[in-house]
């Protein structure tokens, strides 16, 4: 009964959800600058008579209570920020903010959560429990909006028993969703290294300390942290995408600058790896007569989908969409700040299919041609409403 009602409501509000998505898409704002987006969300919550508080500057937390008695609480999270990318799509809702684009689908997440809130508001008399609506800023930039909101108490008063979040996935067809129980996404740390030597004429290596050859040793040796020290059962990735030795054919530079990323799925190993990498790099540089400044900027933790919760909500999704429309996801070594919720609460982060090959909607997130098949916006609103109510015991 409730399922059919939600499905009907998701069709009924579809046009409005698309309009909200297009408004947000045309007016994207960068991480920590979601001022107009936040005001837009607040105005929509006002229309729905949903009380809310502000958190982490542009964050908004709404509380939607069912009229039946229940002390259960579930939190639903949407992120609101866009990326520094110039949109290449020629669409009526193209970004009006040059150089900024909703290329990660956060416009979809935000408009969908507003849609879910609209559905749940219509059903208020029929359910018990509290739905916490988390509109979060700054997913794309460290230290991450999730981190700040948790510090400001988003998971307290009332404390949710479960936190659910969805993210667009252009690899999955619109109409389908994907789940993975357990470890799903990686922690991510940024590495900045300066290898110092003593530059000079390329013809006189005996009078110089060559930071280029030191760097070559460091880069090769550091891969052994991954291949020899990491537990093979737990994935680790170390990649250096920036190596600058600004000498010439006959000039040995004074220093070499490197940037890289380290990703894994185990917090204890993550900290141990940091120490090993630093020690190894500094030791090699020193043994070759140079020195090395090895800095790691800690990023998001790894994301874990709590097993029991994920099994439950996956079941609700099969019930709502049909078994054939619910897929299993592989682990993904990208990072996501929803991971912070998953580290301190029972959480599940699932994927919303937004692909439509026949319309050419296949571009990856974080690219200038990213777009979504908007029919997915019936799934994104209704499914989340259904899962929330089921999880609350309705
Ligand atoms: Zn992103
Ligand atoms: Zn994203």
Image: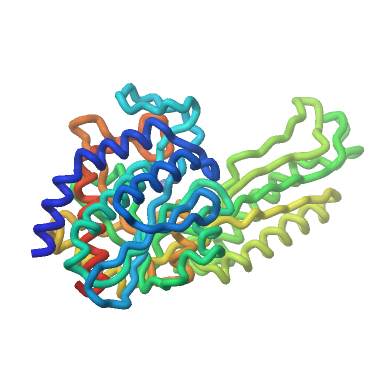
Q: Where residue 247 appears, x then y in whole percent? A: 77, 29
**Can you say whether 290 is above or below 181 in the image?**
above
Q: Quadrant of residue 241?
A: top right
Placement of the N terminus among the 4 image quadrants = bottom left
Q: Where residue 348 appears, x then y in whole percent? A: 35, 64
Give the image's coloring scheme: rainbow
- At 55% across and 51% down in the image, what residue appears? 57
Q: Where residue 99 appears, x then y in whole percent? A: 50, 28
Q: Where residue 222 appears, x then y in whole percent? A: 64, 55
Q: Is residue 372 left or right of residue 317?
A: right
Residue farthest along the right direction in this orientation: 207
Task: Note whether residue 209 is visible.
Answer: yes
Placement of the C terminus among the 4 image quadrants = bottom left
- At 79% across and 39% down in the image, what residue appears? 255
- At 20% across and 69% down in the image, what residue appears? 127
Task: Note whether residue 355 is visible.
Answer: no
**Can you say whether 389 is above or below 118 in the image?**
below
**Can you say whether 201 is above or below 5 in the image?**
above
| Residue nearest the viewer, comparing 29 with 345 | 29
Q: Quadrant of residue 318?
A: bottom left
- At 41% across and 30% down in the image, what residue appears? 368
Q: State the count of labels.
A: 0
């Amino acid at each position: 009964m409730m399922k059919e009602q939600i499905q009907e409501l998701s069709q009924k509000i579809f046009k409005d959800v698309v309009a909200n998505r297009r408004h947000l898409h045309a007016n994207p704002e960068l991480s920590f600058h979601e001022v107009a987006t936040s005001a837009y969300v607040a105005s929509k919550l006002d229309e729905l008579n949903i009380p809310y508080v502000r958190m982490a500057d542009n964050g908004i937390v709404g509380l939607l209570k069912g009229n039946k008695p229940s002390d259960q609480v579930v939190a639903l999270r949407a992120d609101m920020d866009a990326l520094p990318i110039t949109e290449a799509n020629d669409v009526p809702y193209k970004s009006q903010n040059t150089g900024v684009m909703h290329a990660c689908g956060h416009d979809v997440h935000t408009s969908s959560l507003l849609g879910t809130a609209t559905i749940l508001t219509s059903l208020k008399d029929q359910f018990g429990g509290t739905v916490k609506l988390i509109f979060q800023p700054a997913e794309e930039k460290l230290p991450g909006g999730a981190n700040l909101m948790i510090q400001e108490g988003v998971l307290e008063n009332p404390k949710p028993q479960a936190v659910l979040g969805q993210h667009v996935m252009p690899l999955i067809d619109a109409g389908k969703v994907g789940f993975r129980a357990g470890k799903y996404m990686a922690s991510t740390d940024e590495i900045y290294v300066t290898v110092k030597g003593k530059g000079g004429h390329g013809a006189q290596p005996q009078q110089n300390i060559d930071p280029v050859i030191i760097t070559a040793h460091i880069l090769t040796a550091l891969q052994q942290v991954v291949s020899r020290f990491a537990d093979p059962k737990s994935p680790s990735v170390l990649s250096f995408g920036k190596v600058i030795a600004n000498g010439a054919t006959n000039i040995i530079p004074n220093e070499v600058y490197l940037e890289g990323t380290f990703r894994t799925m185990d917090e204890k190993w993550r900290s141990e790896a940091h120490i090993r990498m630093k020690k190894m790099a500094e030791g090699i540089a020193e043994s070759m007569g140079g020195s090395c400044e090895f800095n790691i900027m800690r990023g998001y933790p790894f994301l874990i989908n709590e097993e029991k919760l994920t099994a439950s909500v996956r079941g609700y999704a099969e019930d709502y969409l049909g078994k054939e429309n619910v897929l299993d996801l592989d682990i993904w070594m990208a990072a996501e700040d929803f991971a912070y919720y998953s580290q301190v609460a029972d959480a599940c982060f699932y994927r919303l299919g937004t692909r439509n090959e026949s319309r050419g909607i296949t571009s990856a997130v974080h690219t200038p041609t990213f777009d979504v098949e908007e029919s997915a916006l019936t799934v994104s609103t209704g499914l989340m409403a259904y899962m929330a109510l089921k999880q609350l015991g309705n």
